[in-house]
Amino acid sequence: MAVWKFRGQDLCQVANGGQYAVEDLYDDGWFRLSHEDPRILVRVGRPWTPKWPDVRKVGLGVWVWGLTSQDFENRLLALRGLVAAGPGPLQHVLFNGWVLEMQAELTRMDVNTRGPMAAKVALEFQSVDEPFFRRIDTTLFTEATITATSSPYTVDFQHENPGLEDRGMRIRFYGPATNPTIWNLTADPDLGVYLGYLGTLATTGDFIEFNVRTFQATLNGSAVVSETNIVHSGDRYWFLLKTGMNNLRFGAEDTGGKVEIYQNPPF
């Protein structure tokens, strides 16, 4: 069966020594588009970016029982000690071997006694970083280089995102390139979704890296890039990938520049 872990510890093993424990799951964070839920605010402007809730809740129903009253109490205390010690990684190991992880903290623990040596415990976890699970063993990589010898100096390429819409990838622009820019034609065919750098990467190998979710950019891995040198389409994140295949375009005012995309898909 699929396994749930918190801080690397199998909840089944903590609860009852390895017997069947995790019984139920509800997920209160299935994402709703802004036009479907009036409680989610909508930015005034272009409507191409769905707005997701900022928090995700996951609930687990765990059976705890023991061979003796003391054994039962020890297992219940072990479970409480694991989940109540503050935020940590909540992992879901799927049947196919994928490991999905979300940083979460316990927000509710209800113990419903079902007998002298048995109880059903409801655990509710809430995301503390972003409302997504991400695979811990996967990083998708795509690159494209401008080879055009005359204007427009652009290259069209594709990148497949197997998870939900992603605004958490890292993007690198490599020189030589003047004012390099990337567009997502799938999100907006009218070039309405873009991210660019106002400046020159003069030397082959020089690169600027964007972390589009945290609004951070560095030059050659260390020097912080001023936001006055960054242009983007103006939503909550610098750039996004839609679910499925994304048609992208990379361009500059000259030839030879390269773009790289590093992605850990959200689910």
Image (tube, rainbow, N blue to C red):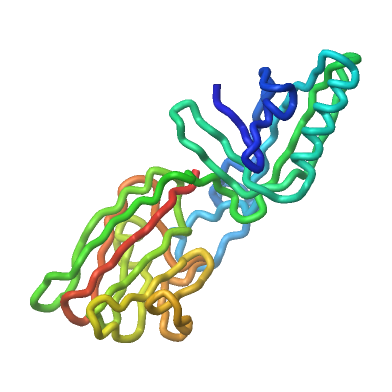
Q: Which residue does the image show at 75% across and 39% down from the upper left?
A: 82
Q: Is residue 197 left or right of residue 12?
A: left
Q: Position of residue 206 (x, y in %)?
A: 30, 78
In terms of image quadrants, where is residue 97?
Answer: top left
- How many marks do you count on the picture? 0
Residue 38 picture location, percent across and down: 64, 51
x 36%, y 79%: residue: 197
- Give the quadrant of residue 59: top right
Identity of the residue drawn at 80% across and 18% down: 65
Of residues 95 and 236, the one drawn nearer to the viewer in this rendering: 95
Residue 101 point in image, percent of width and height? 56, 44
| Residue at the outermost left position | 149
Closer-to-camera residue (6/183)? 6
User: Which residue: 16% across, 77% down?
Assistant: 255
Q: Quadrant of the N terminus?
A: top right
Where is residue 127 shown, x and y percent of the image? 65, 49
Left or right, 21 with respect to 247, comes to: right
**Residue 125 position (above or below residue 155):** above
Q: Relative to 162, is 60 above or below? A: above
